[in-house]
Amino acid sequence: MARADIKLGYSCNNDCIHCVISDFKDKVLEKGLPEDISGEDYKKELLDSRKRADKITFTGGEPTIRKELLDLVAFARDIGFSITMQTNGRRLSDPKFATALCSIAPINFCIALHGPNAEIHDKITQRPGSFYETVQGIRNIIEIRQTPNFLSGKIVISKVNADYLAETSRFMISLGFSSINLTFPHACGNARKYFYDVVPRYIEIKESVINAIQLCFLHNVHVDVETIPFCFLPNLEWLAVELAMSDDDYAELKQYGSEKKIIDWTKKRKQIKSKFPQCKECRFDAVCEGPWNEYPKFYGHEEFTPVMGKPVKTAEEIKTREHLPQAKRSYIFKNMIDNG
Ligand code: SF4
């Protein structure tokens, strides 16, 4: 199935320190365009994407603060999309709104929570009170839907929460998340402006990421990671979400205000990531995408150490864990400790 990701615009009730959208927002404002796409134009984009895709991700900015959202979700449902919504979850703290939204379609929610408590989460969102609203929003939709299967969580890693990834994962599991994604920040927008306060070095977060993964394994919660090169994921390479975004899986991204409205995201993503001279010696060179282009401009590339061993030629070898020695193919917690 093909997926379309259409950004509703750039208004948001948070202002996360790692957020990439401020660059896009500045561009549309410079062009004299409104901050958000109009409801009618969004419907046109939905109809156009439906020719190629049957899954839609509503994202932004923050989709839940758009007044036309319920109408747009109903429209997407009526033309046959299955719906995912990426949200900070704050508006879902209003039980009437959460009930109305959930009554339209069986939406899969991806909710971002960046810390285990208000101090860390609100420092990242730069909005006091956002932690309590997001947590209440999560509780509301679990109560409305009576099952957590539709709920995945996202933690964007930053210097602020890097030491709390396992603690944040533990808290999310206690709330009822059945899936957690750990994403390395892309140094665009706020993350570029405040780079040295926001973006950690990979080498600094490696242990913390592995600890959070182990915790998810222990609790039998699905976990995956995004934009973490394989040289920082020893024996855990198969958790990289990029492996699931293979060349055969069509995905398009519609970025409101951008000249090029449709992008083959799988192809484009590889063009905006970097590889290094030493990668030629690495067994993962054929499949590893490396970090976003901005990262080595700030930190260089010395910390990317080639992984020795039999060359891996296809993503499939990693997804099936064929690339691991037989004894390490199970993700039993004890093995992770021994081999990490
Ligand atoms: S190909 Fe390069 S970036 Fe990727 S794992 Fe190997 S050394 Fe790291």
Image (cartoon, rainbow, N blue to C red):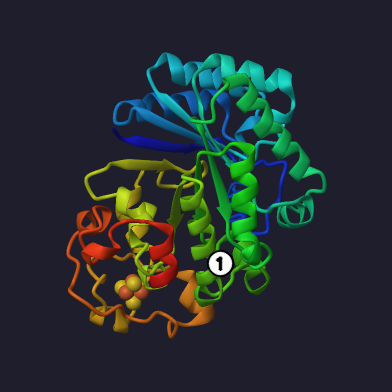
Q: Quadrant of residue 11?
A: top right
Residue 305 place in picture, x, y as percent = 37, 82
Residue 248 sits above or below residue 197 on the image: above
- Looking at the image, can residue 54 be seen? yes
Nearest to the observer: residue 153 or residue 105: 153
Give the residue at x 68% y 54%.
115
Give the residue at x 37% y 70%.
234
Nearest to the observer: residue 161 or residue 166: 166
Left or right placement of residue 83 versus residue 22 in this view: left
Give the residue at x 23% y 57%.
315
> So how many labels did they put on this image?
1
Q: Give the position of the N terminus as an image quadrant.
A: top left
Residue extending farthest to the right is: 128
Q: Give the position of the C terminus as an image quadrant.
A: bottom left
Residue 313 sits above or below residue 113 on the image: below
Residue position for label 1: 208
Name the quarter showing ligand 1.
bottom left
- Looking at the image, can residue 340 be seen? no
Q: Quadrant of residue 273?
A: bottom left
Left or right placement of residue 121 versus residue 26 in this view: right
Q: Which residue type carries mark 1?
A: Ser
Residue 156 place in picture, x, y as percent = 58, 55
- Check disc 1 and report its element: helix, strand or loop: helix
Nearest to the observer: residue 7 or residue 331: 331
Ligand 1 within 8 Å of disc 1? The answer is: no
Q: Quadrant of residue 287?
A: bottom left
Residue 272 place in picture, x, y as percent = 39, 63
Give the residue at x 62% y 22%.
68
Residue 5 place in picture, x, y as percent = 44, 38
Category of crowding for the residue at label 1, using alpha-carbon neighbours closer than 10 angstroms: few (below 14), some (14–19), many (at least 20): some
